[in-house]
């Protein structure tokens, strides 16, 4: 029935995923499973906040789908995919075990990915570089509870949209997009990471954390944010030539080639959250 069948498997050199938040009610595990099942990749980077231990400690929530995501990741690691896990702030407990190998999964505090065309990219969740911008942060202003509320509203809105056969849409993404303070916060965050890559004489940075997918270039430094799997269902992929592309996986009926939102070659591009 699905036209995915003709596309099996989706072959990439690398896939970068962040901010999945397994164990939280907002996690879009179903979409992620759907995507991961179709993917065949040499490298799979888990760029932090894969499991949401903050959320789990407040209320335990672990449906079968969330378990299936972990099982699929481990099975990929077992069957030849090089899986590199860079923990974030919501799964920071795993930072105590970095530079160890768990089964076939490699744990790193942060790491350097070398693209097929030889560029060196810093892979980090990103929360470490928040320090300087924390005081004025959007999250600081709105607070975690308000954010949770937005995510709840988003779930409700999408439930209604599904009933009417509409595509998935991100309310939190939309609101963040609208808020001027959020824009300033995002800019500061991006600049902090670009600055860090430049300081280390690297070609760019791949991060997550702020749930805002993007591929851009600033003063010759590439900024790549994987986005998330609680609102926007985005991922960054690298092909055999080293080209990095942002994908959005939010519509079951949508073909992958229609999901391609941006190509690094095209310059600065962003995911549009507004349906
Ligand atoms: Mn984070």
Image: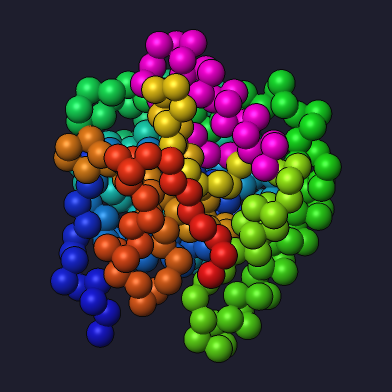
Rendered view: 152 above or below 265: below
Residue 58 locus on image (x, y percent) = 76, 51
| Picture quadrant where residue 130 is located | top right
Q: Nearer the viewer, residue 179 or 212?
A: 179
Residue 47 in sight from this viewpoint:
no
How is this picture coloured? rainbow
Residue 47 locus on image (x, y percent) = 47, 37
Q: Please report the residue visible at 64 percent of the width from the left and 60 percent of the height from the top.
A: 174
Q: Nearer the viewer, residue 262 or 140?
A: 262
**Quadrant where the N terminus lies?**
bottom left
| Picture quadrant where residue 9 is located | bottom left
Q: Residue furthest bottom?
A: 164
Q: Please report the residue visible at 67 percent of the width from the left and 42 percent of the height from the top.
A: 183
Which residue range is magenta in the image?
A: 183-209
Q: Is residue 193 magenta?
A: yes
Rendered view: 69 above or below 34: above
Number of on-image labels? 0
Rendered view: 242 above or below 266: above
Residue 14 locus on image (x, y percent) = 28, 40
Q: Please report the residue visible at 16 percent of the width from the left and 71 percent of the height from the top.
A: 6
Majority secondary structure of the magenta segment?
Answer: helix
Classify residue 107 as left or right of residue 145: left
| Picture quadrant where residue 122 is located | top left
Q: Please report the residue visible at 30 percent of the width from the left and 50 percent of the height from the top.
A: 75
Residue 180 locus on image (x, y percent) = 73, 46
Q: Is residue 99 magenta?
A: no
Q: Nearer the viewer, residue 128 or 186?
A: 186
Residue 149 in sight from this viewpoint:
yes
Classify residue 136 as left or right of residue 225: right
Q: Nearer the viewer, residue 251 or 268?
A: 268
Rendered view: 105 above or below 255: above
């Amino acid at each position: 029935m699905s036209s995915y069948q003709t596309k099996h498997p989706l072959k990439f050199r690398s896939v970068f995923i962040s901010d999945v938040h397994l164990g939280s009610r907002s996690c879009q595990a179903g979409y992620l499973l759907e995507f991961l099942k179709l993917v065949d990749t040499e490298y799979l980077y888990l760029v932090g906040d894969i499991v949401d231990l903050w959320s789990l400690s407040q209320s335990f929530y672990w449906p079968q789908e969330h378990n299936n995501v972990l099982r699929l990741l481990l099975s990929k690691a077992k069957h030849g995919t090089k899986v590199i896990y860079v923990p974030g702030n919501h799964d920071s407990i795993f930072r105590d075990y970095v530079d160890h190998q768990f089964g076939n999964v490699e744990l790193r505090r942060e790491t350097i990915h070398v693209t097929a065309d030889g560029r060196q990219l810093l892979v980090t969740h990103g929360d470490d570089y928040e320090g300087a911008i924390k005081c004025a942060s959007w999250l600081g202003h709105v607070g975690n509870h308000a954010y949770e509320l937005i995510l709840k509203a988003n779930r409700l809105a999408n439930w209604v949209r599904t009933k009417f056969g509409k595509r998935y849409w991100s309310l939190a993404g939309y609101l963040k997009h609208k808020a001027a303070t959020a824009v300033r916060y995002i800019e500061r965050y991006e600049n902090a990471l670009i600055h860090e890559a430049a300081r280390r004489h690297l070609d760019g940075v791949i991060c997550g954390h702020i749930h805002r997918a993007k591929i851009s270039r600033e003063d010759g430094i590439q900024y790549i944010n994987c986005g998330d799997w609680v609102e926007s269902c985005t991922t960054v992929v690298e092909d055999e030539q080293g080209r990095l592309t942002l994908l959005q996986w939010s519509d079951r009926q949508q073909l992958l080639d229609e999901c391609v939102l941006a190509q690094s070659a095209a310059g600065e591009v962003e995911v549009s959250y507004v349906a």
